[in-house]
Amino acid sequence: NSVSKELVWIAKDGELGLFNRSNNSILLEPCCSSIKRIKDGIFLLEKNGLFGMASMKKGLLLSIRYSEIRMTMYSECYIVSYQTKFGICNINKGMILPIKYDEIEEMDSGFFKLRLGSTYSYVDNVGKIMR
């Protein structure tokens, strides 16, 4: 089965991975039960109700351990959660905000509103926090 011109699914012991035909290499070892393309070159991985991410350029971006991964209006940023805490991943820079916040809200102004306990602050899409 083909994912794209360059990528094909691979399977081992009931788990899925990705093989890159253009350079004849394994992009992602079989590690999950589901792989869904969420945008060009970016894939959502799922196993046992937990999620991770992979990219066609970098392979595994986020290991499969997150309760939720939400897209934002900024194509490179995703809000990730583990249990009841939230953080932000930038697919080009990695985790720009650790998973410790009680709430993260995407704002129209190009920032995210953060809540940690009763303290609020803002962060941009590269991780610069403004209080």
Image (cartoon, rainbow, N blue to C red):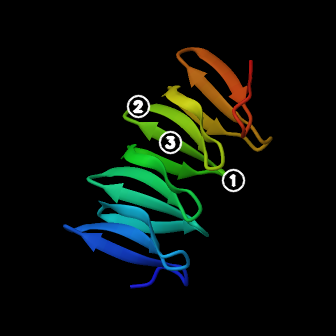
Q: Quadrant of the C terminus?
A: top right
Residue type, mark 3 in image: Val
Q: Quadrant of the N terminus?
A: bottom left
Question: Where residue 45 sits in the image (x, y, percent)?
Answer: 40, 59
Residue in the image at 34% along x and 74% along y: 10
Residue holding disc 2 = 84
Q: Residues within 10 Å of mark 2 (few under 14, many from 20)?
A: few
Q: Nearer the viewer, residue 61 or 76?
A: 61
Residue in the image at 74% along x and 28% along y: 128
Q: Is residue 60 above or below residue 106?
A: below
Residue type, mark 2 in image: Thr
Element marked by disc 2: loop
User: On residue 50, which mark appears?
Assistant: none
Residue lying at the far left of the rendered structure: 13
Residue lying at the far top of the rendered structure: 118
Element marked by disc 1: loop
Residue holding disc 1 = 73
Residue holding disc 3 = 80
Q: Quick check: marks 3 and 1 in contact, CB under 8 Å?
A: no
